[in-house]
Image (tube, grey):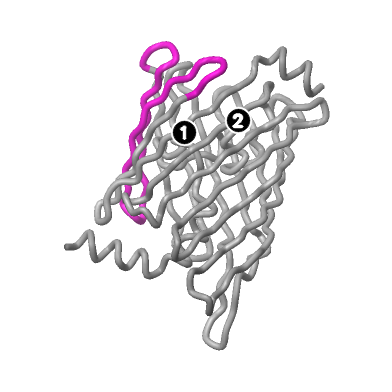
Amino acid sequence: MKKLYAITLLLASQYAVTHAQVTLPAGARSLGLSNTSATLTDVYAMHNNIAGIAPLKSVSAGLYVENRYLVKELTNYGIMAAIPTKKGNFGLNIGSQGGKGLNTTRIGVGYARAFSKWFNVGMSLNYINTKFSDAYYGSANKFTVAVGMQAKVVDNLYIGAHLYNPTLTLISKNEVYKEYVPTTINIGMRYDFSKVLSALVQVDKNTISKPKINLGVEYRIVEQFYLRGGFSSNDIRSSFGFGYKSKQLTIDFAAGYHYKIGFVPQFSLAFNLPESVSKTQHN
């Protein structure tokens, strides 16, 4: 009964929730690490922190599917791609969230560049379409921007920051209230204790909720296989996950657990072209 009540409240406020989810990290690796994604470098950085696609050396594509709290109306999915060039790396981000009552679609393009082995920056432009089943609300089409950076401070210590929608884009308004796409900032740090063990910490803040601290640990148990776990403050959420990574293929699964509402499972799959092929086609 408590879970049903909590989910009912969640669905009742789905409008704000859906737009908050626009900024939720993508990829099961991130979820398994309790969304500590600011310092990660992979194709999902196109959504998580645009600066993270800068170091990529080969054409990459990824997809993910997430079902929040096992509620059909809160299903999220997306596809991402990154293309390296001599002048920097370009990316594409397409995703959808929600169900028939309320659905949000996003399309983003981005650019990132590594100015050295120590420093990456990036920027993306995102189109957001929101559709309501209720004709009174109709639909809304808006644009947002995001900027990000990553840096290596010293050996094994990395920092990252990502700012989404700094202009606080207005979605809709009436006589009673105004609705905005949330502005979100994520600041994170990662320390690699060795080639097999990393610890991550990240602070998240947006305009509709209190600051949240996320902690994550990643351990490579054997060659190409990883275990992950994490914890988030505020909503008292834990997470766990595992993954497989080779030169061309990455498969990850993770689940977050909210102590009142339940599980958030996510699956993601990414593929990298051989680096030699990428250079031939895009350099």
Which x, y percent locates residue 86? 82, 25
Marks 2 and 1 sit apart, C-alpha to C-alpha, by 11 Å
**Magenta segment main secondary structure:** strand
Q: Is residue 269 left or right of residue 167?
A: left
Amino acid, disc 1: Ser
Residue range (magenta): 221-250
Q: Quadrant of the N terminus?
A: bottom left
Q: Which residue is mark 2?
A: 61
Q: Which residue is mark 1?
A: 268
Which x, y percent locates residue 40? 55, 33
Amino acid, disc 2: Ala
Q: Is residue 87 left or right of residue 218?
A: right
How many numbered discs sit on the rendered protein?
2
Which x, y percent locates residue 117? 70, 24
Residue nearer the viewer, 43 or 35: 43
Helix or strand or loop: what does disc 2 sit on? strand
Q: Is residue 266 left or right of residue 281?
A: left
Q: Is residue 133 above or below residue 254?
A: below
Residue at the spot 56% in from the left edge and 47% down from the top edge? 95
Which x, y percent locates residue 134? 48, 74
The 10 Å Cα crowd at callout 2, few under 14, some 14 to 19, many 20 or more, is many
Helix or strand or loop: what does disc 1 sit on? strand
| Picture quadrant where residue 224 is located | top left
- What is the number of the mark on residue 244? none
Q: Is residue 225 magenta?
A: yes
Q: Is residue 63 magenta?
A: no
Q: Quadrant of the C terminus?
A: top right
Q: Is residue 257 above or below residue 85?
A: below
Query: Which comes sooner in the sequence, label 2 or label 1?
Result: 2
The 10 Å Cα crowd at callout 1, few under 14, some 14 to 19, many 20 or more, is many
Residue at the spot 40% in from the left edge and 39% down from the top edge? 266
Q: Is residue 107 above or below residue 160?
A: below
